[in-house]
Amino acid sequence: MNIAFQVLGPVELRIDSQQIDLGPARQRSFLAALLIEPQQPVSINTLIDRVWAGHPPDGVRSVVYTYIARLRRILASAKPEGGHPIRLLRDSSGYRLDVTPAHVDLHRFRGRLARARAMDPHDPRRCHVLGEALELWKGEALAGLDNAWATRLRHSLQQLKNDALAEWAEAELHAGRSATVISELRYALLQEPLAELLHEQLIRALLHSGQQAEALSQYERARRVIADELGSDPGHGLRELHRQALTGTLPAPPESVHARAEAAAAPPHATEEEPGARPREAAPGPSLLPGNAADISGREKYVELIRRACTEERSRPTLLVLVGGAGVGKSALAVNVARGLGAHYPDGTLLVDLRGSGDRPLSGTTAVLRVLRAMGAEPGEGRDLDELVTLYQCRLRGRRMLLVLDDAADDGQILPLLSNEPGCGVLVTSRRPSLRPVGARVLPVGPLSYEDGLQLLRDLLGEQRVGAEPAAARELVELCEGLPLPLRAVCNRLLARPHWSLRITVERALDEERRLDTLSYGSLDYGARLTSVYRQLTPMASAVLARLGTRPASDAVSAGQIMSGLSVEEAEEVLEQLVDAHLLDVAGVDSHGTVHYRIRGLRWLFARKMAEREGACASAGR
C-alpha cells in the first residue's frame, strides 16, 4: 500500500514506505481528528472541540485555517509515485480527507477484527486474522497527543485492543498453543494491569499448561491490583477460574470471548430447576428514567428505527445518536423507546442529562460519577477520569445495560461512557450534527409531517374538538411548523381553556409580534429553547443571525452578502455554525458552487426579535 496513515501508535504518514514529517503535535491532532472518519466531513466546530476540548484560544478559527493550510501543503507534496496527491477537501459540511478507510490502520484493524468475529470459533485461520489485526498496533494509540479528546479515544481503543487480544488468546488455546499465549499476555498485562479479561485468559492458559501454582499466583496478583486501584473485587469469570485452580480442575476448552458477550446480550431463556427448588428470580437493574416524558404520537417510524438499532445488532455495543433542533422531540423519543427495552437490557436503564444546551454542561468526570453511583458504586473522592472510566468498564463487564445520554454538547461528554460490551447500548440526543462518535449511527430527527402533526392534535385534544374545526387545525400545524414542542404548548393552552375555539388561537398566532408567545405555554416555551441556542453562538454568529432578522424571510443569502469586514470563507463558517445550530437552512447551491442559505418562520421571527433587542441595546449605549 503506497499510502499508509497510522493512529495505532504515533500519528504518522508513510508514502511509498517513507515517513512524512507532519509537524507539531497540535497539527497532528487535526490530522487524527480527520483520520478517525476518513471521507466523512468533520465540521470546524467538531475539530475545535477535539483539538482544544472546550478551551480554544482567542481567534481559534484563524489558527484552524493555518493548520489546515499547512496540512494541505504537506499532503499535496507527499504524492505517491505514479499516484495522485492526498486531498484535504472542504464543503458545506466541513473538512474531509479524500482517502479510503483501507489507508488508515485503525480501520484495517476494525475490518480484520470483524472478519475474525464472523468466522467459526474453531476455524484455525482465526489465529492468523486476529494476529494480523494486532500487528497493526505500533504502540499506544495516538501516542504523543495529550489533549482530552485524544486521551479518551486512546482509552476506548485500548479497550478494543484488549478484547481483540483476548479473542486471539482464545483462538490460540483452541489450537493448543498455551505457551505462546502465556508470554504475550504477561507482556500485555505489564501495560494493562486492570484488564480482567486478559487475566482470565492468562490463568486459563497457565492451567492448560499444567502450571496450577502459577495460576493461583496470577489470580492473587490480579485480585490485589483490582482491589488497590479500583477498590472492588474481581469479576465472576476470574473468581470461577480461581475456584478451578484451587481444586485442580482443568478448565473446559475456552468458550468464545465474542460468543460469551453475544450470549450475555441474548434474551433470557428458561432453564430446568431441580425438583422442589424455588424458582430463581434475577434482580432487576435500576431503571432511572423520568416519569413524565411527552407523548410521541406521529413518531412510529422513528420508534421502530430506534428499537431495531437498539435490539438487533449484537456483535458490538449499540451507539445511536438522535440529532435535531430545539423542540423536535428528541428527548421524548429516546425516553419513550428506552422504557420499552427493559427485556433487552435487564441490568438497568439509566438516563443522564448532560445539559449540553445550557450554560454549564456536565463534564465527562461528573457524568461517569453519576452513572457509577446509580450502579451502586462509591468511587470515593479524588479519582481522575481515567480511573473512573476503568472502574466503569469493569462494572459493565458481562452486563446488559442501556444508557440514555440526553442533550450532549460534544464528544468529551460521551466518550468516557462508551463500552465495548456487546450487550450494552448508548442512546444519545443532541442538537449538534457535528456530534459523531466513532462507530455511531446518527439518526436526524426533523419536524412532524403535516398528517402526523394533525394526528398529534387529535391525540391530545380529542377527535371531536379537532374534527369540529378542520381548517383551523390545519393552520395550527402549519403555524407550529410541525414542531412537537409548540404543538403540545398550543394543546395544553386549549385544554386549560376548554371554552376557547381553535380559531381563536390561530388568529392570535397569525400576529407575527405575538406568535412565539402564543405558541408557548408554561415550560413548553419554544422561544426560550431558541434563546438557549442563541446564547451558545459566537458573537459574530449572533450578529449575523440578528442581521438576517432584518431581511425579508423569503430571501436566500450567500456568504458574500452577509456582513462587511468578513472574508467569504469566514462568512461561510459563521453561516455553517448557524446551520449546525438549526437556526438556518441550506437553500441550495447554484451553478457556480455558491451555497445559499435561508431562515424562515418561527426562527426568522426569533432572529427579528434579536435584531430589535440588539438595536435597542445599541441605542441605549449611545
Image (spheres, rainbow, N blue to C red):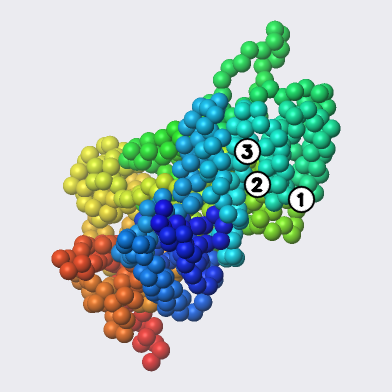
For disc 2, the marked residue is: 392
For disc 1, the marked residue is: 229
Residue 368, image x and y in percent? 62, 52
At label 3, counting other C-alpha atoms closer than 10 Å, the crowd grade (few under 14, some 14-19, many 20 or more) is many
* Quarter of the figure with the C terminus: bottom left
At label 1, counting other C-alpha atoms closer than 10 Å, the crowd grade (few under 14, some 14-19, many 20 or more) is few
Residue 223, image x and y in percent? 79, 41
Q: Which mark is residue 166?
A: 3
Separation of marks 2 and 3 at Cα, in angstroms:
19 Å
Foreground label between 2 and 1: 1
**Residue at (57, 57) in percent of width and height:** 9
- Looking at the picture, tell me which residue is in the foreground, 75 or 218: 75
- Whether residue 149 sits left or right of residue 387 in the image: it is left
Foreground label between 3 and 1: 3
> Is mark 3 in CB contact (under 8 Å) with mark 1?
no
Q: Of helix, strand and loop, which one carries label 3?
A: helix
284 up-or-down from 445: above or below: above
**Residue at (83, 38) in percent of width and height:** 217
At label 2, counting other C-alpha atoms closer than 10 Å, the crowd grade (few under 14, some 14-19, many 20 or more) is many
- Whether residue 512 sits left or right of residue 241 in the image: it is left
Q: As shown in the figure, which amino acid type bears the numbered disc 1? A: Glu
Separation of marks 3 and 1 at Cα, in angstroms:
22 Å
Q: Is residue 357 visible?
A: no
Q: Of helix, strand and loop, which one carries label 2?
A: helix
Residue 185, image x and y in percent? 69, 42
First in sequence: mark 3 vs mark 1: 3
